[in-house]
Image (tube, rainbow, N blue to C red):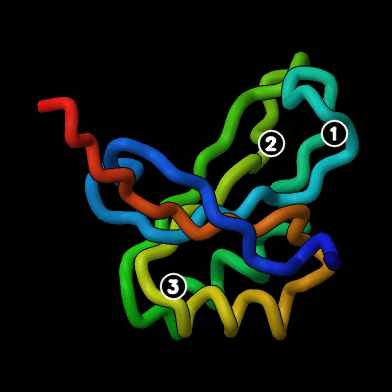
Amino acid sequence: MSRLSIKTVERTNLPFGRYKFMVLLGRSARRPINAISNAGEIEDMRNMLRTTCKGKYKLIHHDNYKGRRVYTRLYLTEAMDLAMIKLVHSEKLHKIYKIKVANDESL
């Protein structure tokens, strides 16, 4: 299985109430505090999302030890936006997840 194939994650609710896809963005280190800022690399992706995104999106970032932004996750609502990102900016992606809501029958 390739690293950019879509994996399914089961959760009790959707992140932030609406996002169905989670994309882990590539960075230089596993921990964001030790990673080099990837804001320059992600800028092209942000511009594309602003202009051509059909649904909603959310970029999550953390600060590294120098106080610079390290983008770690991208949440998307539409599958077409994910396909567009995967086609154009595949080198900036690490893993892709489809979020599935689990039915909690214990209630």
> Tag 1, which secondary structure?
loop
Q: Earlier in the sequence, mark 1 or mark 2?
A: 1
Which residue is depicted at the point 44% across and 53% down? 99
Residue 78, given in percent of the width and then of the height, sits at 38, 74
Q: Residues within 10 Å of mark 2 (few under 14, many from 20)?
A: many
What distance separates the C-alpha of mark 1 from that of mark 2?
Answer: 7 Å
11 is higher (above) or lower (below) than 5: above
Q: Is residue 21 left or right of residue 93?
A: left
Tag 1 residue: 36
Any mark on residue 50, and which?
3
Which residue is depicted at the point 43% across and 62% down? 76
Give residue 48's quadrant in the image.
bottom right
Residue 36, given in percent of the width and then of the height, sits at 85, 33
| Residue lying at the far right of the rendered structure | 28
Q: Residues within 10 Å of mark 1 (few under 14, many from 20)?
A: some
Give residue 104's quadrant in the image.
top left
Task: Locate the C terminus and report the quarter of the image it occupies.
Answer: top left
Q: Name the amino acid type tagged 2.
A: Val
Q: Are marks 1 and 2 in contact (CB under 8 Å)?
A: yes
> Tag 2, which secondary structure?
strand
90 is higher (above) or lower (below) than 51: above
39 is higher (above) or lower (below) than 45: above
Between 99 and 59, which is closer to the camera in this rendering?
99
Q: Name the amino acid type tagged 3.
A: Arg
